[in-house]
Amino acid sequence: MRIGTGLLLSLISGLIWGVIAIVITGISLTLITGLAATPIISAGALAGAVNAAIIISRAPKNRTPGLYLVAFAAVVIAMMLVSFGMPFSLSFSQNSATQAFGVGLIALAITFANRMCLMDAHAGMLKRYSFDLVIVRVFKGLGFVFFSVIVILPFYVMVMTSLKNQQDLFLNPLDLSIDLSQGFASLTDSYVELFTQFNFGSFLLTSTIVSVSTVLITLAFSIPGAYAVARLKFPGQTVLSSSILLIYLVPMIVLVIPLYAVFSQLGLRNSLVGLLIVYPATTVPVALYMLQGYFRGIPAELEEAGLMDGLSRLGVIWKITLPLALPALASVSLYVFMIAWNEFLFAFMFLDDPGIFTLSRGVVSLNSSEVPRQHLMAGAVIATVPILAIFLWFERFLVQGLTAGSVKG
């Protein structure tokens, strides 16, 4: 009997998703409950393969919700049988509700992953296009899961640790569960102490001032510069347009020592003025590149009409070009703000006075044996959440502006 490539490929897909689902769920169970949950990988692999075999047993057009329900149940049964009722090497009497939820989550994840990867595949011999399509879907899903875990897991550990107290962390460092019976005030002690004892409010205010000032200075220089490159004719225009980003060929670490020496002699080393010189110098080139591409995309006829109506060149920029370039301006502002907010190297080298520490510099100052770990994590949360919220709010402008800035007129 000849085994079709579709069946073989589906079994491999199911095996992969079964292993990934049970491993990730086991790690999550360990972090949530504090128990040493060791997933039985063979149980997940077999359950995933059985799930895929059930799905692929029918032609794509004949796959009903009932089939996927059977495949879901098969995952649960296979895992429980292979692991003798302990898919996480734990007795089901320990956190039984959490373990049951984890098993259900594994079954749901495997069923969904196999459904998406095998949506138009069949059990027989697959054509080259269909074969490659399944492989691409599997690798695409693996990439999505991999990068999601890389982002979510550290953030989860950071947030949960910030809500723990020192005693709980010493008793069981793996237990990142939260006891809600403690009350909101007890859970947020680290955040309160961070602002009352470690001057974190000053760090937050300083970073806000520096970041907003960097945005304003960058826009003040990059808007006229980008407009000149995009619209005006002058000697060296082509060279300037193509060499804007050459500064990024030089690693910032190479510039730190010379700048440190020069700023020390000028009295700018331990001041925010020094940062407000360095930060715009590193953000203006990319802002120029993004904006000049967007300005080239604006029809020149609109500006010529404004000039014929009596507007000056500055009036055209202010009343016509800038309103049309708002998406690009928003994306550039967000990008520059993120750079200034997260910048650490220059702040670490130039700032010595805790009274003017930026947020990134202030978080590092908490990394000592005298500061509890939950305070360090709380500081990291405070540094991350504002920029994350701003990014999610303006993300559509960032994508639109980056796309426009990459196209040459």
Image: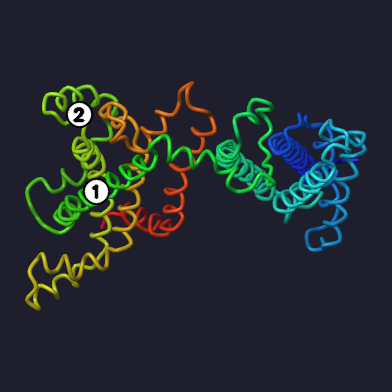
Query: Residue 378: percent from the left, percent from the top?
Result: 50, 38
Tell whether 58 sits left or right of 25: right
Image quarter of the C terminus: bottom left
Q: Which of the pair 207/108 is nearer the observer?
A: 207
Task: Classify mark 1: helix, strand or loop.
Answer: helix
- Is the Cβ of the residue at disc 2 closer than 8 Å to that at disc 1? no
Q: Which residue is drawn at 27% across and 44% down?
A: 210
Q: Residue at x 65, y 31 (%)?
A: 168
What residue is pinned by disc 2?
269
Task: Classify mark 2: helix, strand or loop.
Answer: loop
Q: Which amino acid lies under the numbered mark 2 shown in the image of this protein?
A: Arg
Q: Is the residue marked by circle 1 packed among few (<14), some (14-19), or many (20+) residues within 10 Å?
A: some
What residue is pinned by disc 1?
213
Q: Which amino acid lies under the numbered mark 1 shown in the image of this protein?
A: Ser
Label ID, residue 279? none
Closer to the chain start, of discs 2 and 1, is: 1
CA–CA distance between discs 2 and 1?
Answer: 18 Å
Q: Residue at x 77, y 40 (%)?
A: 18
Q: Is the residue marked by circle 2 packed among few (<14), some (14-19), or many (20+) residues within 10 Å?
A: many
Q: Residue at x 27, y 32 (%)?
A: 249
